[in-house]
Every structure is written in C-alpha cells, then in structure tokens.
Image: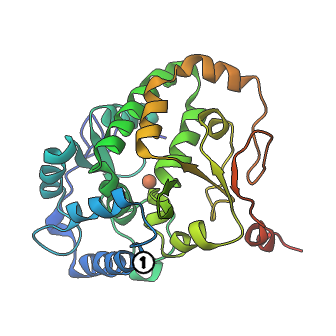
Amino acid sequence: MHLQPPEGAAADWTVPQNWAHYTPEDHAVWDTLFARQAKLLPGRASEAYLRGLDVLRLSKPGIPDFKELSDRLMKLTGWQVVAVPGLVPDDVFFEHMANRRFVAGNFIRRRDQLDYLQEPDVFHDVFGHVPMLADPRFAEYLVAYGQGGLRANGMDALKYLARLYWYTVEFGLVAEPEGLRIYGAGIVSSFAESRFALEDASPNRIGFDLERVMRSAYRIDDFQQTYFVIPSFDELLRVTVETDFAPLYEAIRGQADIAVGEIVPGDTVLTLGTQDYARGKVPA
Ligand SMILES: [Fe+2]
C-alpha cells in the first residue's frame, strides 16, 4: 500500500472521474450489468436498496456521472461519490466516509469479465453501494463506521472493524416482513451471489451479533459460507452508535477467531447450511 497518493491524485487520493473518457463499450457494459441486476433484484433485495436504485437513474444512460449522482445523493442524505484510482489506505478511506464521501473506482470491467472481478470497479462501487447511501439510516451507519474507523486505527483493531464492514456493508442480509432480503454491495452487484445468498442450501444464515461478527473470519475469494442477518437498519445503526467499541475490542482480542463456516454456542441460527458448495470446492 502506498503511503503517498499516486501521481495525478489529490492529497486525499481523489482523482477526477473523467466521465467524457468512457467509451461507448464501457457504457454498454454498465447498461448490460444494470439491466441484468435490476431484473433479478425485485423480491430479493431489501426495500431500502430497491428504493435507492432510482438515484442511479440519471439524465443519460451508461456509467453515472459522479457529479450528477452526488448532487442527487447530497439532497437525500448529504453524501457524495468521489473517484479514486484504486484501493486507498485505511485512514484515507475512513476520513472520506466520516465526511460523507464514498470512494469509488472509476474503471469498469470488460465484457468478458461480467462475473469476475479482481478489484472493485465502478459497477460494484456505484451499483452495489450507492443505493444504500440514499437510505437515511444506512447513510448514518456508514458515517458512524467511518468515525469508528478513525478511532480504531489507533487501537490496533482494524481487523475487527473490517469484519463488521464485510458482513454488513458488503455481504449483509436483512429480515423483512416478507422474508430475508439482501443489501450487501458484494451480493446485490453479483448475478450469481444474489441467488446463492438467499436461495442456496449451502450457506449458514445467522442472526447479527456485533461481537460475533467481529470475531468471524471471512473469505474473499468465493461465495460466503455464512451470512449475518440484521433485524432492521434502525437496529444496525442503534447498536453501532450505542456500543462502546474500545472495551469490545479488548474482549475480542482475548478470544480465538471463529473460522469461516463455523457455528458457535450462542448463535441464532436461521439456516444451518449444508456447506455442500464449499465442500465441492475442496479437491478430493
Ligand atoms: Fe464494496
């Protein structure tokens, strides 16, 4: 990880989105991905996410112009979307988040990579994350997360906070009156995982518990083996704002990590997964 921003980036690591430089093919890839997910998500994505999706329907098709997108988002929740050249250092990420700036990659995947991504592109970052930023409760949750990150940086606790982000912002499920729904950006931006997370018998689905989540390892290379289910966005925000994290980090530090896919005493197991998918991946 660089400690200095790369050439051409500002001191806060942002770069101009340079919307005019996208090719017609770049915009066509966005439109293909957008249409495919927009068709799949009703009945699967949370109500908050589906409501927020409208914020992406801008004056022209294709990859959103961050300026126009930010103007709309600003009116709803005070957030903006800023472009960065790739992954940024933790403190830079948290500083932007605490100040209601969501950092997004400005490149888009190629058409032969619709389902495969090594690092987050503009489709993951904008289609996946921005609709939830239009929800007032989730928007506040992310501000609280950014502030918590700035504090955790000095407490050697980023590992625990990263797990909270992973299991909520990226791969979270929510229990709605009509049933389980997806809201994590890593799920809603993925054609295959949108169905796997909700409908497959393989993964565990466990009630959200802050300490449990922060003790839980995760896998970055494949579908999750466990998803955590929040009861509501109000509750996620409440727990995050009301918890004193410093003693919690101390308590976690004295305990072993919980392995990927493991169930532990105290878990509220909504679905005990078969883990067949994960097992099938292990060479015989
Ligand atoms: Fe993400």
- Could you tell me residue 200's position as x and y percent? 65, 72
- Could you tell me residue 22's position as x and y percent? 22, 71
- Could you tell me residue 163's position as x and y percent? 58, 41
Residue 187 vertical placement versus 192 (above, below): above
Q: Is residue 119 visible?
A: no
| Rendered residue at 39%/82% (across/down) | 111
Label 1 C-beta lies within 8 Å of the nearest ligand 1 atom: no
Residue 188 is left or right of residue 61, and the answer is: right
Please identify the quarter of the rendering in which residue 203 is found: bottom right
Depth order, front residue of 171/25: 171
Residue 16 is left or right of residue 282, and the answer is: left
Q: Quadrant of ligand 1?
A: bottom left
> What residue occupies the far front of the structure in this picture?
177
The quarter of the image holding the C terminus is bottom right
| Rendered residue at 12%/50% (across/down) | 71
Which amino acid type corresponds to the residue marked 1 in the rendered image? Leu
Residue 239 is left or right of residue 255, and the answer is: left
> What residue occupies the far right of the structure in this picture?
284
Number of numbered markers: 1
Q: How is the image coloured?
A: rainbow
Depth order, front residue of 154/46: 46
Residue at which label 1 appears: 40
Please identify the quarter of the rendering in which residue 43 is found: bottom left
| Rendered residue at 47%/59% (across/down) | 177
Q: How dense is the environment of label 1, judged by Cα within 10 Å: few (below 14), some, or many (20 and up)?
A: some
SS state under label 1 = helix
Residue 139 vertical placement versus 253 (above, below): below
Residue 56 vertical placement versus 138 (above, below): below
- Could you tell me residue 214's position as x and y percent? 63, 36
